[in-house]
Image (spheres, rainbow, N blue to C red):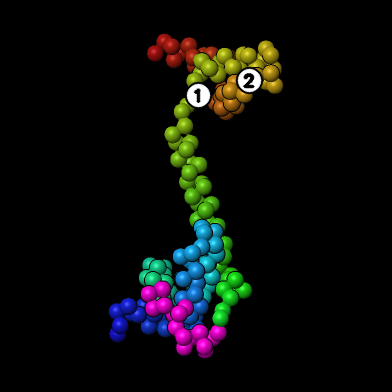
C-alpha cells in the first residue's frame, strides 16, 4: 500500500469525492480566513459519510492535497469542472460556530481573572459624588468606576467602611 494514500484507502473515499476534495484543498491555500472556514466545512460535509476519525481528518486532507486530484486530467474529463461554491454543506456552522463561541467565552473568563478588584476608597468617593451631583453628571471615567463598584457595594457608606478597614490594615 502506498504510504501517501494509506488513509484514503482505509476510508475508501470515492474517486469523485477525492476530486472535489482536491479542488477544495487547492482553493484553501488561496483563500482568506472566512473563505477557508467555508471550504473546511464543505470538506467535512463530503467526508462525513466516510466516518473519518477526528484525528485522521488533517492527515486525510493532506494526503488528498499531495495527490493533486484537482489537476488529474482523467478526473477533469470524467467529472468536468466543478464549482465548489454551488456545492452545499450541512456542516457549515456546526463546527465553526461552537469553536468561535467557546473561544469568546474563554477570553471573557480569562480577562475577568486578571481584572483588578475595585478600590473601596475610589468607590466611596465616586459613589458620594454620584449622590451629590447625579450619575449623569459624572465624567466617563467616574461612570466606569461607579459601574464597577456597583456590583460590590450597595452604598457609598459600605465602600467607605471597607476603605477605612483597608487603611487600618
Query: Magenta stretch: dominant SS?
Result: helix
For the C terminus, which image quadrant?
A: top left
Span shown in magenta: 65-80
- Vertical order, 89 against 146 (above or below): below
Q: Mark 1 points at which residue?
A: 118
How packed is label 1: few (under 14 Cα within 10 Å), some, or many (20 or more)? some
Q: Nearer the viewer, residue 153 or 38?
A: 38
Q: What x and y, as percent, mark residue 72? A: 44, 83
Quickly name the residue at label 2.
139
In the rendered view, does 61 fall on the left or right side of 91? left
Residue at disc 2, secondary structure: loop
Mark number displayed over residue 71: none
Closest to the observer: 49 or 141?
A: 141
Q: Residue 167 at what x, y percent from top left? A: 43, 11
Residue 128, above or below 15: above
Q: Give the percent coordinates (x, y) of residue 54.
A: 41, 68
Task: Name the residue located 48 percent from the left edge and 80 percent from the top edge.
Answer: 19
Distance Cα–Cα, label 2 vs label 1: 17 Å
Q: Is residue 78 magenta?
A: yes
Answer yes or no: do the residues labelled 2 and 1 have beta carbons within 8 Å? no
Q: Is residue 150 visible?
A: no
- Residue 93 visible? The answer is yes
Amino acid at each position: 500500500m502506498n504510504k501517501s494514500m494509506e488513509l484514503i484507502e482505509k476510508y475508501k473515499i470515492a474517486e469523485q469525492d477525492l476530486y472535489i476534495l482536491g479542488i477544495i484543498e487547492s482553493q484553501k491555500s488561496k483563500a482568506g480566513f472566512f473563505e477557508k472556514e467555508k471550504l473546511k466545512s464543505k470538506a467535512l460535509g463530503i467526508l462525513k459519510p466516510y466516518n473519518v476519525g477526528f484525528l485522521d481528518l488533517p492527515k486525510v486532507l493532506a494526503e488528498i492535497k499531495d495527490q493533486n486530484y484537482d489537476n488529474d486530467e482523467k478526473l477533469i474529463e470524467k467529472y468536468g469542472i466543478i464549482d465548489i461554491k454551488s456545492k452545499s454543506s450541512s456542516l457549515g456552522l456546526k463546527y465553526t460556530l461552537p469553536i468561535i463561541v467557546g473561544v469568546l467565552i474563554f477570553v471573557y473568563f480569562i480577562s475577568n481573572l486578571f481584572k483588578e478588584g475595585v478600590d473601596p476608597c475610589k468607590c466611596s468617593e465616586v459613589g458620594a459624588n454620584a449622590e451629590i451631583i447625579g450619575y449623569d453628571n459624572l465624567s466617563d471615567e467616574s461612570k466606569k468606576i461607579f459601574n464597577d463598584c456597583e456590583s460590590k457595594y450597595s452604598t457609598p457608606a459600605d465602600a467607605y467602611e471597607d476603605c477605612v478597614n483597608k487603611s487600618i490594615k
